Amino acid sequence: MSSRLIPLLASLLSIILSLAASPGYGQSWPTAPKIAAPSWMLIDATTGQTLASSNPESRFSPASMAKMMTAYLTFTALRDRKIRLDQGVASPAEAEVPQGSRMFLLPGKNVTVSELLQGLITLGAHDAAIALAKAIATTESAFVESMNKTAQRLGMANTRFANSTGVPHPENYSTVADMVRLANSLVQEFPEHLREFGRRELTYNNIRQVSRNRLLWLDNSVDGLMTGRSETEGFAIAVTAHRPQPLGTRERLQRRLIAVIAGAASEEVRAQEGLKLLNFGFQQFDILRLFKADESSEMIPVYKGTIGSARLHFPRDVLVAVPRGKAESIRTQVERPTALLAPVALGQPVGRLRIWYGNTEIHQVPISAAESVKPAGLLGRAIDAMRLWWRALSTEV
């Protein structure tokens, strides 16, 4: 381990604590602009923090935004090598495809997974969604089952899918908070596919169509994601953009924001309000890098193991979004046990760094084991059992 590393996490954290001058307490969080939609949410995807929201848990019909889950499962199948981008897939029969957005596949004709992804993401094409669903799970119903299982795994507790297309159905519902979780999962888990969401137009079968995400034309920092429309609930959008921090900030880190809006009155309004939210997030907040991944560590005692201690560290960069120019309002607290019992697994969470802005907790970062510790033999475990007994007895006294 480099001699530059600080041996004790507590010493390391004193660097941050020195920033937490008491006058910072009670600082107000930036107020979001008025958004012309009943439900919306903005997060900093770099840290996962919520920057602003309104009615984020209200249910709505996601419409074509449900295709983000279809895309997520397609990317998962590609990663797991269950399908290939150049693999030919049979187009669905005309009767299988509901009315609405299409890439105009020719029934029975083979089309590649790559082409279907382009149609799914750029156009929100129903025929592409059904073709991909059947290619991955044989039947759309089996695919929908996977959609719902994946939604549960991702923590989308208020979401239910009834089809791969998002076509309105009583069992097709979600919330902007859940759509944010899904969008962020796409961004974090499949960055290599994010460019697919930035395509402005697509020509297939000699038919040129353009993306309904107007923000791809309005702001070059926008590179996704998807839109939706319901006859009864209006227009929705999930959008992401990335920009560098401005000159003059402590560190010019790249930032990525994700916004989801539901219930806008028109395509134009959802684009305007989406851009308004993104500009608010980029203009009113900065990202601070408190520590680099594995930059510092400390040793923690380990009982009943083959070695008597293990190294703890931050498994990834410690980043936090704060109101611009308010770094002095940050304070932190470390929570972790005084010792561990073997076995200890590499990467095992053993504590957390809690971060406050004034008196409000705004973020948590895990502290994990940087090495594994195997259980000791019978004699070693017996000796440590006695040590623990004596330690407990001494503490009581």
Image: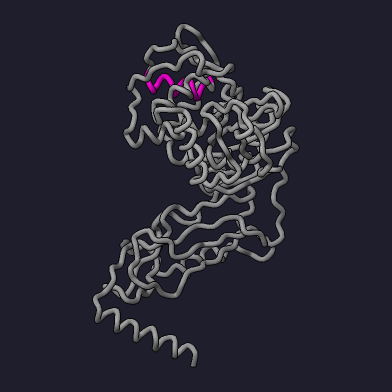
**Quadrant of the snapshot with the N terminus:** bottom left
Would you say 182 lies left or right of 387 here?
right
Q: Is residue 113 magenta?
A: yes
Q: Is residue 169 magenta?
A: no
> Number of callouts in the render?
0
Image coords of residue 280 (percent x, y): 66, 39
Image coords of residue 320 (percent x, y): 55, 52
Can residue 224 be spotted in the picture? no
Would you say 72 lies left or right of 370 here?
right
Q: In the displayed structure, would residue 166 be above or below residue 321?
A: above
What secondary structure is the stretch in magenta mostly built from?
helix
Q: In the displayed structure, would residue 271 be above or below residue 105?
A: below
Residue placed most toward the observer, 177 or 136: 136
| Magenta highlight range | 112-123
- Residue at 57% x, 55% y is 363
Would you say 124 lies left or right of 313 here?
right
- Residue at 39% x, 12% y is 109
Res 25 quadrant in image: bottom right
Res 265 quadrant in image: top right
Image coords of residue 96 (percent x, y): 50, 18
Residue placed most toward the observer, 239 or 77: 77
Res 80 quadrant in image: top left
Would you say 303 lies left or right of 362 here?
left
